[in-house]
Image (spheres, rainbow, N blue to C red):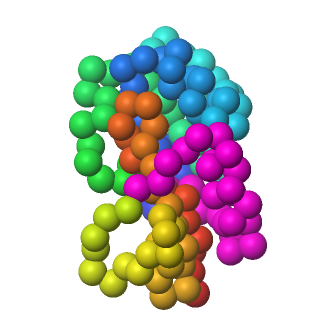
Amino acid sequence: MLSDSTPIATLPTKDMAGARKFYEGTLGLAPTQEVPGGIMYRCGTGNLFVYQSEYAGTNQATAVTFTVSDDDFDTEVDALRKKGITFQTFEYEGMEWKDDVMVSEGMKAVWFSDPDGNILNVGTEGT
């Protein structure tokens, strides 16, 4: 059954070298497998597959979420800022913002884009 399977987040890129620089250098992910046209990264108990595609960056919604503990959130966000990541804000009912961090109903989250415009999210699970 699919409910017993672990999904793999899949992101397109137009520039594999630029994507590698971002995912490995900026986000600190280590490649676990390279196949023609793509690279697999292990993230916790899941995987992220980045592959060559002319459609990279066409999704205007969150493509991947990295969930971190409440205790680790500020450290992760600070590390991303130090690497030059700029966070996005937007209007959505029920969301409250403290600068560029969404703080709402026991949750904290930030959104940012990779070099292709794919939208990534780092957030806590909330209570």
Q: Residue at x 38, y 62 (%)?
A: 89
Q: Position of residue 3 (x, y in %)?
A: 46, 61
Q: Residue at x 57, y 30 (%)?
A: 22
Q: Quadrant of the C terminus?
A: bottom right
Question: How many tags in the picture?
Answer: 0
Q: Position of residue 63 (x, y in %)?
A: 39, 49
Q: Quadrant of the N terminus?
A: bottom left
Does the magenta-highlighted stretch encompass residue 122?
A: no
Q: Quadrant of residue 68?
A: bottom right
Q: Position of residue 88 (x, y in %)?
A: 41, 56
For this view, does 94 lie left or right of residue 99?
left
Q: Residue at x 54, y 39 (%)?
A: 48
Q: Quadrant of residue 56?
A: top left
Q: Quadrant of residue 126?
A: bottom right
Does the magenta-highlighted stretch encompass residue 84?
A: yes
Q: Nearer the viewer, residue 89 or 34?
A: 89
For this view, does 76 lie left or right of residue 98?
right
Q: Is residue 93 visible?
A: yes
Which residues fall within the magenta stretch? 65-88
Q: Nearer the viewer, residue 83 or 12?
A: 83
Question: Which residue appears farthest toward the top when viewing the image?
Answer: 36
Question: Does residue 80 sit above or below 41 in this rendering?
Answer: below
Q: Position of residue 58 (x, y in %)?
A: 24, 37
Q: Residue at x 55, y 44 (%)?
A: 85
Question: Does residue 109 sit above or below 6 in this rendering?
Answer: below
Q: Is residue 4 visible?
A: no
